[in-house]
Amino acid sequence: MGSKLWCIVGSSRGIGLEFVRQLLARGDQVIAAVRDPMSASELWQLTANSNRPGACEIHQCDVKSEQSIHAFATRMRQVLRHGIDYLVLNAGVLNYPNRATEISYSDFAHHLHTNTIGPIITAQRLLATGLPIGTIIFMSSDSGSALSFRDFEDGFGAYAASKAALNQMLRHMAAELRRKSSPTVILAMHPGEVSTDMADISTGWDIEGILTAQESVEAMLRVIPTKTIEHSGTFWTWEGKEHPW
């Protein structure tokens, strides 16, 4: 298949860091974007230990800042010559609990800015640079499914709403790009119930089928390359099953 260039936005920990780890190990090139490069110690250590110097570039991109997103897109336009094969929008937040009956205005806005608005605007700005982008993967969640509503998930109101809004926006993005005859593929991915720092919470129910970040990313890296322009605007699980919106 040859070496590909992957851009992982939100790569300092959890799923994003594991994407970088596995992509470097298999010989791909990586742009790793993080909110604060100075505090991304695990990412720096990972790149320092790589036997391929220069295979991973670390850049700053705070998806909660329009200015930061714009600056990141501008840098990519300047440093990339051949575009991006795969863009993974992984930055996200889960402040638990986030119940609809209790959540503050600012905390609800925080979830929407980080999980919905930031990823969509990042993709939009990168597309606007004119750089060819093969596939854009938005990290979604089964919590954001309207057809498969998870009413037992107490305390996930704002998180679920932010992922549902992300799903609708990426579907519109896919439809708009299709009308422009763009070759870019837009996908939503549910990574599974992954054990990460963000998911390190105590819930009132048993969470079944917990995956490690390694297992989730290994599976997603098998699924993502199988999706073509005919699949643009669709929602998939780490297992390669289409998920209901």
Image (cartoon, grey):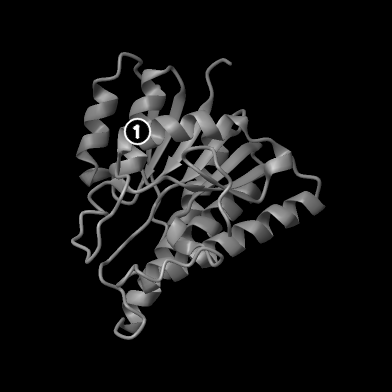
Q: Nearer the viewer, residue 99 or 131?
A: 99
Q: Is residue 240 left or right of residue 209?
A: right
For label 1, count other residues whose C-alpha is less than 10 Å away and answer few (under 14), some (14-19) or many (20+). some
Q: Is residue 207 left or right of residue 30?
A: left
What is the quadrant of residue 49 in the picture? top left
Q: Residue 86: x and y, percent?
A: 55, 35
Please tell me whether residue 22 is drawn above or below residue 76 in the rendered image: above
Q: Residue 80: x and y, percent?
A: 55, 32
Q: Nearer the viewer, residue 213 or 2?
A: 213
What residue do we see at 57% from left, 40% from top?
Answer: 77
Q: Nearer the viewer, residue 124 or 24?
A: 24
Residue that badge 1 annotates: 215
What residue do we see at 43% from left, 61% from top?
Answer: 143
Please tell me whether residue 171 is drawn above or below residue 98 in the rendered image: above
What is the quadrant of residue 101 in the picture? bottom left
The outermost residue toward the bottom is: 101
Q: Is residue 7 left or right of residue 109?
A: right
Quarter the C terminus occupies: bottom right
Q: Is residue 233 left or right of residue 239?
A: right
What is the quadrant of residue 4 in the picture? top right
Quarter the N terminus occupies: top right
What residue do we see at 53% from left, 33% from top?
Answer: 223
The amino acid pointed to by label 1 is: Glu
Q: Residue 202: x and y, percent?
A: 18, 61
Q: Residue 140: x and y, percent?
A: 47, 54
What residue do we see at 63% from left, 48% from top?
Answer: 127
Element marked by disc 1: helix
* Residue 80 appears in the picture as rendered: no
* Residue 34 appears in the picture as rendered: yes
Please tell me whether residue 74 is drawn above or below residue 50 in the rendered image: below
